[in-house]
Structures are given as C-alpha cells and as structure tokens.
C-alpha cells in the first residue's frame, strides 16, 4: 500500500506539469485539521517583482534566494522546492498548514498567487477481486454483484452491478489522505472474536481482548471452572480468537446456559462483522472494507449462546480506554494501548435500555467515543437493546433498493439505515442476489485453521444477512468521518451521518408493499421506510466525508474545443455538501505558450480564459468554504491553433494576409493597453477588430 | 410487578439466526424455566447492582446483596467502579423474583439493580 501511495504521489507531481490532454484532475483532499505534514504551496511571482531579478548560478539557487526573501517578510522559515514555471515553484514550511501558508504568501505584493500544493489520487475502484463481482456456480460462489453495498449508488440492476441503497464508500475513499482511512483511528468490534488466520484481515488488526468470563466466575471475571460460554477453556485473557459458538443438541438439552438457543453450527460472526470494517483493501485479495485502512480491534464478548451484559459492558469500557487505573487493577485487566474512537456492536436482545448501559454511554460519550449498534432482526418489532440506548447510533437494515428489509426492526430510536443484505424472491437452490459478502471461516463447529479455513461468505449457505452487517457499515463510515476530522464529537458524527443520508425511496420495492408503520406487536416485513422509523435516510459515506472535510474544489472545462483567440469557459464542479457554501478564486498557474489570461472576474463559480496561441495552459481553482476550509484543484487545458483561413489571394505570398486573428487581437490589445483603455473596452474593441478581420478575409 | 411475568409477557422474536431462540432471552435463561418443563428446581440468576457508595470490597458487596435479597449471593465481577455483577441462588424462579424486588427496594444500598442478561449477534 505504501508503494502504491508513493506511485500516487509521483503521479500527482507529474500532473502539475502541462498535460497534452484537457483533463480535470482529482479534487484536493487534505483537511487542515489533520495536516501534520509540512505545509506545501505553489507560489508564483509577479512579473515585475524585484524577486524575479535575484541572480544566482542556477535556477535552484535563484529559488533559494527568492524563498529566503519571502520567508523574512512573513516571518516563517521557508524552503524552496521544485520549479513549476519560470515564475512559480514549490515552497514548503513546518508548523502551519498549507492553507495558512498560502494565505500569508498571497498577501505579499511580490506574489501573484500562492495556492496549496495538494496531493491528487487515482480515482479507481479497489483491486480486490470480489469487489466488482464474484462468479456464481450452481451451489457456491457469488454474489454476482460483488460488494454492491460499497459502490456508488445507482439504478437497481444486475447488469450494472448497482443498487440504490449502496453506501457510496468507493467515492469517499478518494477524499481521504492517501486514499485510505486513518491508520491511527481504531474501531473496536465487540463480537465473537476473530479468526486471526484469515489473510485478508491481518494488516489492520490491533490487539484486542477476550472479555468472556467463566460462567461460574467468582470474582472479577477470573477463576471459575465452567467455560461453556467462552468455549476456549479459560476466562478473560488477551486472546480474542473465536473458538466457535456452535451449540450441539446435547448441550442444548443439558446445559442450562444454552436452553434458550437453537442447535447450530459456528457463525464466525465476529470475523464477518470485523471484515466489513477492516478487511485489507486494494491488496488484490478477497474483498474491500468500508474502513479502508482504519484499524480494527476484536473484543470478544459473545460466545456460545451469546454473551452476558456484564462481559459486554466491560468490553465497551475497556475498548474505549475509559477505565481508571483502579478499575483496571480491580478487574485485573491491562490498560488498552489502542483506545477505540468507534465501537461497533452487532448484538442485542429485546428489552429496554438498562441502567448499566446508560451509565456506560455517559462515560463513552464524555470520552468522545462513537457507539454504533444493530437495530435487531425481529421483523419489524421495536428496536432492541443496547441499540435503543441514548447516545448509541442505532442502525436499521435496508434491501438493495432502499426499502426496509423484512427482518429489520424499526422505530424512532433508529438514527440511520444501511444495507443488511437481501436475497430477492428466489426459488430453492437459486443464489441469494444481494447478500453482504465478508470474511469468515469454513469450520462447521471448530475453526479450520490456517489459510485453508479462510473463506468469504457467498450467495448460498453462508450468505450474510442481518442488521449485524448494517451496523459495521455505519461504524466504518464514522471511522472515515473521524479520519478527516478527528475532533468531531459523537453528536457531530451522528449529525453528519444524518445530514448527508440520502432520502428513502417510495417506489422500487416488491409489488404491493406499503409504507412502514410503527411497531404494533405483529411482524412487519419489507416496507417503505419513513424518517420517523428508519432514521434520517440511507447511509452515504462520500457525502458524509465531504461534509466532515469541507468543500472539495473541482474543475470542469465547458468549452468543447479550446481554440486560440477564442474564450474558454471553465466551470467549478466543486463538491459542496449539505449546508456548505464556498467562495472561488481562479488563477492561471502556467500560461505556457498560450498567453492565456483570465478575462473578467476571477471570483465566481465560472471563469473565462482567453488564450492567444496554441499550447497548454494550467488553471487553478481555490475554494474556501463557510468553515474556512481551503481546497485547490488544478486542470491543464490544451488549446488548438486558430484555423487558418483560406487565402484571399490564393498565392499565400508574404504579407499581411498571413497574420492570424490571434495575432491581430494580441497586437490590438497591446496597443490599447498602452493607451490606457479599460479592460472592458479592450474586449469590446478586440471583438470589433476580430469581426473586421474575418470580414476582410471573407472578401 | 413480578419480574418474570413482566419479562415473559414481552413479544419476543428471534434476535439471532435462531427463529424462536429468543423466547427466554437475557437473564431469564438462568432464572426462568420454560412453561413446558417440569416443576422448577433451584435456579441461579445473574444480576448487576449499582452501589450508592462505590466499593471494591467483593466479599462485602456479596454479603450485603445476600443479606438484602435473603438468598445466597456470590460475587462475579466488577463492571465499573459502581456496577458489580453477582449471582443469586434461589429455590425457584419466583424466589429469585422476590429477591430482586427486595434489592430494588433497598435504595439506600443499591441505586439500581438490573439483570445480567444475554445478548446475541444480530445475524439472520
């Protein structure tokens, strides 16, 4: 991944050079809040600046002298970087952001402009093979739509592999520093533990803990002799490996702890939920994950027949790092060296939120920890607990088209909805069309060890369905929000997710379904969500990251075929989120041979550039949003030569007939400028002369 | 309201992949006997108590819980400075209900009393 980032950086540097094609580049990405790298700015001097007269043996030496002078004027130690053109080059400094440095340099009289020199990234889908699609055989494989839930939303269509409820994670990754989630951001997954031998999970996992105490524990979760729930032969320890949660018929009959559970094989539930947040992305193996580089911490709280509240609560408080030293000492637990900012809890039961969870949430919220939980799968009944606890982001499940999936619960406690997997109406033996694909183990009861046991859930027996999978998608989204803005509080993360959620659809579901109603005590399957029952809308990760980061400058060239002597219209296509606004500043970074200048205002969302000759010019757009976030985009525009008109004499002999319109306009502009005629008048005059020239040639 | 009646009357659905498994969700798994089973025998119920005055004296906490509840209690684990997990051993489920009621009424010692119930993965 690091090598790839280096390649991306090299590409980004290369993109600053004039390009042969007219191609808008990717938008800027680095938020000032996490800007720990040196400030990096492209500065361009005014043509008449004294600094342009600095003499040195080499261009590098001249830039060094220029930068020293600039540094003295703003009181910052500057270093010179690579040249961009004869009057512009890169400047770096430490101790302030790129936006701040650009603003200070822009204020100097010698500087025509200074803009942040930001990274651009390749905009592309990850190369994980199952992301795009996965082969479906008669009884195995799939889903054919791959990881449909991470992709940009689109029409319901197997042919296009798009779905209206997809969470738009792929487009969000492009906005992240380095194209990945912050590796210092930890999401704790409180679940059944992890199969550490899955090769697609190892890169992003930080050490967790096994919090399942003995069933007959007699103090601090230690001791005891009955480890039937833990199923690993011991109580709390530092190994959160998932040893399986199968229930045999004999266990159900004879163990009073398991009487309420059905006979079943092992679920590998924790490996599945953690994979959605932490599977290694862009490693050409298996699947991508919404967290795309954030760290994940397995905290084992569920064993056979689930887990006890007391173990879950200890897991929550330890994972977040909020235990006091005396509490840790009494519990016999080590301090958590990797406190989590997000807890993902795909677990619950029916019932109201109990006081210990309320107390835990008070501590977690005070510690700025975001907690996400699944609504529950009782088919349209009231939201379970702890999802119904104040402060927890409760997540309901959606079908691929965006209506409520039949198994999901709903109610006013829901904050937002996300895909939970659905199969569409299928016949026996046919593949489930829209399950959530994730990591798992092939063991029926005990794990199959090593890479041989590492599998991905598919469209058949191992199809992953449930609000268990909706919650990790939201937890992963929260981790990306905090990646770009780590200062956000849990309430701000929640409001960001909600403000950017897409509206629920009112059509597209199965025939005859109705709008969802508040739980009445009877099952309620598929139905059209309302904001009072399914939260603010459908999760949109990109929109959430945009809102968290700031307006992202983007440029689009409106003029189809830029031609010398003709105005080129360039528009802002900046990404502006809900509640955001921006101001604009356009500049010519490099005119090259085109002689391009900005014609008219340079502070609107559209700019007109007038090139006078063929070649390539580079234009920048700097946006400043209502939160003072600054973003810059740069685009190279290729200008074709003005068409050579048919010669009126036919002989092409030397003389005035060989002069192009551009030359005439340039000449006239220079004359008028010398005469002190206003810019507007020059344009009017140029248009008049241009028309005259064409008229003359026609004759 | 008797705890077991209250909990048992809730409309329960499968939380996990187990369609009817949640009938005895939570702490009732240890305390409540399914209606179809024979006459209930001695049962253990897990609960959490929030102390009005923080303490880490495990033996003292268990002794106080046992004294107030009127049934044997054993300390299980600290959850936080205020919350502690314990077990009660009762002759039958109704005895555990009554014991918990007594604990909840002892507001001078216990700010809150909750069952230490089970949670399950929310997968179909």
Image (tube, coloured by chain):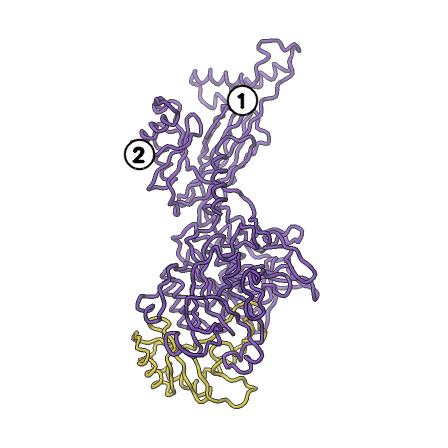
Chain B on-screen colour: yellow
**Foreground pick, A100 / A185:** A185
- Secondary structure at badge 1 equals loop
Image side of residue A9 versus residue A425, left or right: left
Q: Which label number is shown at residue A613?
A: 1
In what quadrant of the picture does the C terminus of chain A appear?
A: top right
Q: Residues within 10 Å of mark 1 (few under 14, many from 20)?
A: many
Disc sitting over residue A74 in the figure: 2
Question: The chain coloured purple carries which letter?
Answer: A
- Which label sits on residue A73? none
Q: Locate residue A528: give its quadrant.
A: bottom right
- The residue lying at 57 percent from left, 17 percent from top is A660
Separation of residues labelled 1 and 2 (CA atoms)? 37 Å
Report x, y in % for residue A272. 54, 62
Whether A699 is drawn above or below A593: the answer is: above
Q: Is residue A523 at all visible to an observer of this figure? A: yes
- The count of marks equals 2
The location of residue B2, given as percent across then percent down, is 45, 84
Chain of the residue that carries numbered disc 2 in the rendered image:
A
Secondary structure type for disc 2: helix
Looking at the image, is mark 1 or mark 2 earlier in the sequence?
Answer: 2
The chain letter for the residue carrying disc 1 is A
Q: Nearer the viewer, residue A295 or A449?
A: A449
Residue A34 position in % (x across, y down) = 39, 47
């Amino acid at each position: 991944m690091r090598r790839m980032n280096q390649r991306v950086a090299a590409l980004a540097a290369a993109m600053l050079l004039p390009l042969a094609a007219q191609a808008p580049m990717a938008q800027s990405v680095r938020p000032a809040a996490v800007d720990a790298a040196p400030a990096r700015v492209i500065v361009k001097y005014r043509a008449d600046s004294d600094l342009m007269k600095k003499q040195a043996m080499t261009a590098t030496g001249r830039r060094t002298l220029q930068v020293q002078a600039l540094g003295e004027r703003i009181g910052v130690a500057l270093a010179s970087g690579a040249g961009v053109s004869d009057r512009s080059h890169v400047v770096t400094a430490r101790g302030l952001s790129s936006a701040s440095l650009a603003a200070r340099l822009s204020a100097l009289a010698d500087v025509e402009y200074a803009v942040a020199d930001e990274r651009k990234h390749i905009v592309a889908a990850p190369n994980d093979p199952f992301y795009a699609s996965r082969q479906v055989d008669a009884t195995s494989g799939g889903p054919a739509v791959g990881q449909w839930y991470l992709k940009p939303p689109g029409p319901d269509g197997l042919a296009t592999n798009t779905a209206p409820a997809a969470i738009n994670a792929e487009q969000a990754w492009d906005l992240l520093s380095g194209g990945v989630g912050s590796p210092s951001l930890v999401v704790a997954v409180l679940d059944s533990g992890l199969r550490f031998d899955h090769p697609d999970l190892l890169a992003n996992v930080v050490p967790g803990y096994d919090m399942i105490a003995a069933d007959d524990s007699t103090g601090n979760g230690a001791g005891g002799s009955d480890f039937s729930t833990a199923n690993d032969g011991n109580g709390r320890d530092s190994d959160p490996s998932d040893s399986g949660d199968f229930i045999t018929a004999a266990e159900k009959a004879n163990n009073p702890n398991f009487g309420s559970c059905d006979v079943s094989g092992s679920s590998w539930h924790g490996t599945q939920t953690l994979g959605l947040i932490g599977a290694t992305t862009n490693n050409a193996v298996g699947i991508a994950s919404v967290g795309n580089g954030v760290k994940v911490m397995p905290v084992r709280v569920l064993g056979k027949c689930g887990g006890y509240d007391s173990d879950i609560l200890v897991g929550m408080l330890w994972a977040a790092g909020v235990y006091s030293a005396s509490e840790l000492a009494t519990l016999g637990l080590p301090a958590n060296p990797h406190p989590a900012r997000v807890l993902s809890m795909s677990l619950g039961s029916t019932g109201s939120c109990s006081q210990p969870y309320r107390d835990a949430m008070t501590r977690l919220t005070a510690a700025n920890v975001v907690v996400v939980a699944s609504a529950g799968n009782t088919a349209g009944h009231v939201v379970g607990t702890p999802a119904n606890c104040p402060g927890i982001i409760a997540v309901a499940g959606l079908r691929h088209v965006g209506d409520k999936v039949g198994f999901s619960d709903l109610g006013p406690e829901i904050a937002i909805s996300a895909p939970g997997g659905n199969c569409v109406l299928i016949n026996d033996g046919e593949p489930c069309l829209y399950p959530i694909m994730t990591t798992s183990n092939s063991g029926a009861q005990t794990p199959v060890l090593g890479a041989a046991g590492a599998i991905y859930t598919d469209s058949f027996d191992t199809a992953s369905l449930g609000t268990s999978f909706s919650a990790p998608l939201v937890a992963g989204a929260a981790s990306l929000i905090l990646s770009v803005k780590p200062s956000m509080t849990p309430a701000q993360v929640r409001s960001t997710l909600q403000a950017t959620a897409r509206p629920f659809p009112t059509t597209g579901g199965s025939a005859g379904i109705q709008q969802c109603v508040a739980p009445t005590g009877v099952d309620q399957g598929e139905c059209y969500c309302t904001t009072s029952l399914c939260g603010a809308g459908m999760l949109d990760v990109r929109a959430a990251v945009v809102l968290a980061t700031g307006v992202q400058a983007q440029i689009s060239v409106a003029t189809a075929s830029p031609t010398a002597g003709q105005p080129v219209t360039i528009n802002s296509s900046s990404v502006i989120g809900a509640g955001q606004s921006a101001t604009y500043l356009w500049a010519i970074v490099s005119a090259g041979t085109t002689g391009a200048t900005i014609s008219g205002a340079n502070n609107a969302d559209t700019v007109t550039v007038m090139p006078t000759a063929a070649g390539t010019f580079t234009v920048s757009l700097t946006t400043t949003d209502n939160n003072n976030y600054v973003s810059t985009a740069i685009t190279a525009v290729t200008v074709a030569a003005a068409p050579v008109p048919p010669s009126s004499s036919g002989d092409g002999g030397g003389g005035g007939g060989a002069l192009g319109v551009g030359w005439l306009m340039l000449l006239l502009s220079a004359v008028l400028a010398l005469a002190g005629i206003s810019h507007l008048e020059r344009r009017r005059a140029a248009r008049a002369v241009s028309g005259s020239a064409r008229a003359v040639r026609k004759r | 309201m008797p705890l077991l009646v209250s909990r048992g009357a809730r409309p329960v659905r499968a939380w996990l992949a187990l369609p009817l498994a949640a009938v005895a969700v939570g702490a009732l798994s240890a305390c409540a006997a399914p209606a179809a089973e024979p006459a209930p025998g001695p049962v253990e119920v897990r609960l959490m108590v929030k102390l009005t005055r923080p303490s880490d004296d495990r033996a003292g906490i268990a002794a106080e819980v046992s004294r107030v509840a009127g049934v044997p209690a054993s300390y299980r684990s600290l959850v936080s400075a205020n919350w502690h997990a314990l077990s009660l051993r009762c002759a039958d489920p109704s005895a555990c209900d009554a014991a918990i009621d007594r604990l909840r009424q002892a507001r001078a010692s216990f700010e809150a009393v909750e069952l230490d119930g089970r949670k399950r993965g929310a997968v179909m």
